[in-house]
Structure formats: C-alpha cells, structure tokens
Image: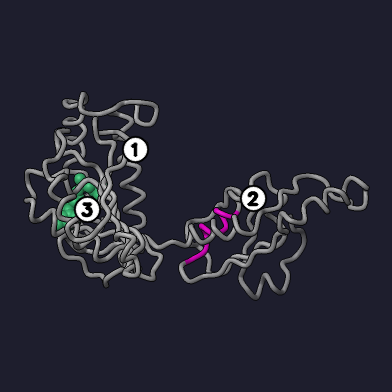
C-alpha cells in the first residue's frame, strides 16, 4: 500500500497502482510488455500458480523478469530460521528452477488453428452462431442418448452454457489471433505451412467424423498433409456422426504405414460422444527420425 503524493517515477511513467494477488492477477491476458516480479513467488501458497499468472499477462514478444530463490537453498534457509538467525515468517515455498523453466516454456507455446471458418469476421461468426445455437441445443436434446452425461457435462443445459462461454472466449480472442496469425484460414487437404513446421498437429472432430461426406482419398491426403507439417499427428475421434466406428480408420492406418509412419490407436480419458474415446497417433517411424522439424509449435485443425 502506498501513501502520499505520487513519486516522480509514477508521474513520469504514468503508472497506476493496483491491489491484487499474484495468484489471480486482475489483468487481461498478454496485457504488459514487461512484467517484473522480485522475490515474491516464494511467499505465496502456490508459486507455480503465481508463475502461470505472471506468464499469462506478458504480451507476445514481451519479457518476464523474475527473481525467486531456488529450492536447493531451502534446507539452509529452514535451518537458519530454526536457529532464529532470520527474522522472516509466513510461506517460503522455493521453486525448483527446472520446473519453473518448464512451466514458462509451456506457457510460451504457440498454437495455430486452421479452419475455413476463419475467412469470416467475428461479426459474421457471431451471427451464424446466434442463428443455429437453439437448433443445435434442440437436436442434442433429441439425441441425448448419443452422449455421456456426467460430472463434467451433466445436462444439455450445462452443455449449452459451456459452449456459449467457449464461443465468447474464442470471439474475444479472434481479432488478435487473426492479426498474430494464430487463426489461419486454410483447409485440408492442403495447408499453408512449411514441412515440419510444428511439433504436433491435432485434428479434432473433422476427419473420421465426416466419414459419409469425405472420401477415403480425402482422408488419406489430409493425414499425409498433417504429417508433412508436423512431427506427430493426433486425430480424434475415430467415430462418424451418429457414433458408429468410421470405416475410414483402417484404410488411413494402412496408407500411413505404407508411407513409413508409426500408427497407433490409443484410448483417451475423454468421452462425450458415446464411444468416441480413442485417437489415432501418427508419427515418423524412429528409423528415419532425422526428418523431424526444428520448431516447437503445436498446430490445431
Ligand atoms: C465439428 S467442427 C469441429 C471444430 C473443432 N475442431 C472442434 O473439435 O471443436 C468441424 C470443423 O471443420 C471445419 N472444416 C470444414 N472443412 C474443412 C477442411 N477442409 N479443413 C479443415 N477444417 C475444415 C469446419 O469449418 C468446422 O469448424
């Protein structure tokens, strides 16, 4: 808390003071070019949460300047406190440097999403959602037996609220994402990225889901294209609309194996569409792993 007249620095930088917790910063994502935190995190009950929050508010290309003691020193400090050599009380949760570094790196990942939907502006997308939302909810109510209703999504009304909140979040981020090229107007089977541009490509609720609408050749070409741009590809789910297993799974698996990729079908801990709890993972076979790209960017289609 500060009292008295604003300092020269405050006046010159036009800075404002704000009271809040480092564990729940009262600022928007990517709000600041420079974030400075000196010897604070270790005095909070959850320093990793504090680190996530500090990282969250740094703008792309910005800087987080952070000092906090490393966990290696904690036994020494505890001993000094026990001997009353230090006058401090309260939390002293020192971080492991490697864990802190991993967390910051993870937060710094770039995610690029591709969809032909992104050729429309936010206003058009919002209008389209408004036009079909009630119909989508009514259809889900009619086909409620096709879905798993549990603690995560207990009812159709809860689903409608979740979807609506997700859409709001997406649309809030949309204009910034377009200008930062995080949302890219593109469509499979041809993507505007260099070979090996991404570590991971996720294809969710498109391939296999539209089995009736998209041919076997389209599926194979799309899978090849995803493998061209990313080191690893995951496609989810493996069922078609209506919930039947997709007849495209076997041919895609065979085609990718013929091309020299490792392909596996794996269970995932998420099932909303009944029976949709498996994904296909495709990666370059380890024998010729030198193909892998350099970037650490995941992509989502
Ligand atoms: C059922 S939605 C899934 C959206 C999102 N991936 C998800 O899992 O929530 C199918 C999406 O596929 C997009 N789409 C249609 N044709 C496409 C293509 N050729 N390549 C990539 N995406 C396409 C549609 O615009 C739509 O957003």
Q: Which residue is mark 3?
A: 125
Specify the segment rendered in magenta. Answer: 51-59
Residue at image location 22% in from the left, 69% down from the top: 192
N-term mark: 2 or 1:
2
Q: Position of residue 260 (x, y in %)?
A: 22, 60
Query: In the picture shown, does residue 154 fall above or below 40?
Result: above
Residue 47 image label: 2
Q: Position of residue 70 (x, y in %)?
A: 71, 58
Q: Nearer the viewer, mark 1 or mark 3?
A: 1
Q: Quadrant of the C terminus?
A: bottom left
Q: Is the C-beta of the residue carrying label 3 under 8 Å from the nearest atom of ligand 1?
A: no
Q: Quadrant of the N terminus?
A: bottom right
Q: Nearer the viewer, mark 2 or mark 3?
A: 2
Query: In the picture shown, does residue 242 fall above or below 256?
Result: above
Q: CA distance from mark 1 to mark 3?
A: 18 Å
Left or right of 48? Residue 274 is left
Q: Nearer the viewer, mark 2 or mark 1?
A: 2
> Of residues 237 and 13, which is closer to you in this image?
237
Q: Which residue is mark 1?
A: 162
Residue at image location 57% in from the left, 58% down from the top: 54
Residue 6 image label: none
- The crowd level at tag 3 (other Cα within 10 Å; few <14, some 14-19, many 20+) is some
> Of residues 26 and 60, which is closer to you in this image?
60
């Amino acid at each position: 808390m500060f009292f008295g007249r604003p300092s020269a620095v405050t006046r010159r930088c036009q800075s404002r003071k704000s009271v809040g917790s480092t564990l729940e910063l009262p600022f928007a994502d990517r709000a600041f070019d420079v974030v400075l935190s000196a010897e604070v995190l270790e005095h909070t009950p959850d320093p990793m949460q504090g680190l996530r929050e500090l990282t969250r508010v740094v703008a792309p290309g910005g800087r987080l300047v952070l000092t906090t003691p490393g966990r290696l020193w904690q036994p020494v400090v505890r001993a000094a406190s026990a001997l009353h050599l230090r006058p401090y009380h309260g939390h002293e949760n020192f971080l492991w440097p490697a864990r802190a570094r991993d967390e910051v790196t993870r937060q710094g990942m770039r995610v690029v999403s591709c969809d032909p939907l992104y050729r429309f502006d936010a206003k058009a997308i919002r209008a389209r959602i408004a036009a079909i939302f009630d119909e989508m909810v009514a259809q889900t109510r009619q086909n409620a037996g096709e879905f798993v209703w549990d603690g995560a999504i207990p009812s159709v009304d809860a689903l409608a609220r979740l979807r609506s909140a997700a859409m709001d979040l997406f649309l809030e981020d949309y204009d910034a994402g377009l200008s930062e090229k995080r949302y890219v107007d593109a469509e499979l089977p041809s993507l505007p990225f260099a070979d090996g541009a991404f570590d991971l490509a996720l294809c969710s609720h498109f391939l296999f889901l539209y089995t009736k609408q998209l041919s076997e050749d389209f599926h194979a070409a799309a899978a090849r294209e995803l493998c061209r741009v990313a080191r690893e590809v995951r496609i989810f789910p493996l069922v078609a609309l209506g919930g039947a297993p997709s007849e495209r799974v076997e041919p895609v698996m065979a085609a990718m194996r013929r091309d020299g990729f490792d392909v596996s079908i794996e269970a995932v801990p998420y099932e909303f569409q009944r029976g949709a709890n498996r994904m296909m993972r495709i990666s370059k076979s380890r024998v010729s792993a030198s193909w892998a790209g350099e970037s650490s960017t995941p992509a989502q289609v």
